[in-house]
Image: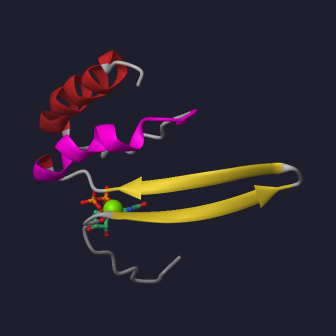
Amino acid sequence: MNEVVHTSPTIGSNVEEIILRKTHFLMWDIGGQETLRSTWNTYYSNTEFVILVIDSTDRERLTVTKEELYKMLAHEVS
Ligand SMILES: Nc1nc2c(ncn2[C@@H]2O[C@H](COP(=O)(O)OP(=O)(O)OP(=O)(O)O)[C@@H](O)[C@H]2O)c(=O)[nH]1
Ligand SMILES: [Mg+2]
């Protein structure tokens, strides 16, 4: 709180491993910019879950987000 957090757009990806008891989470943070979305499908194999972060105040982009989510879910398992 009361702290300015500096962020920069994700280019490529950031990977983080979290271990909780015997469960290992390997989390990939990937960029959401339009030009980077075509690379998303290279992260799908062995993926158990997806966390999609949206800005709920950006009403215009909700439709785009929905389309991108459906595209992701419709992707063939490889
Ligand atoms: N108010 C508020 N602003 C946030 C929060 N998280 C991120 N932001 C702001 O939202 C903007 C984008 O944040 P990022 O974390 O770069 O968003 P991103 O989804 O990772 O974007 P990409 O890496 O390009 O996919 C920045 O201006 C942040 O300061 C939050 O929890 N609260
Ligand atoms: Mg990011």
44 and 27: which one is in front?
Answer: 44
Residue 56 visible (yes or no):
no
**The residue stretch that appears in magenta:** 35-48
Magenta stretch: includes residue 39: yes
Q: Is residue 37 magenta?
A: yes
Secondary structure mostly seen in the magenta stretch: helix
Q: Is residue 63 above or below residue 13?
A: above
- Tell me where residue 9 sits by quadrant: bottom left
Q: Is residue 46 left or right of residue 31?
A: right
Residue 37 appears left or right of 20: left
In the rendered image, the residue lying farthest to the front is 78
Q: Quadrant of the C terminus?
A: top left
Residue 17 position, x and y percent, is: 64, 62
Quarter of the image where ligand 2 sits:
bottom left
Colouring scheme, one of rainbow, by chain, secondary structure, one colour: secondary structure
Q: Position of residue 76 (x, y in %)?
A: 34, 18
Q: Position of residue 37 (x, y in %)?
A: 20, 44
Query: 59 or 38: nearer the eye?
Result: 38
- Counting from the top left corner in percent of width and height, residue 41 is at 31, 37
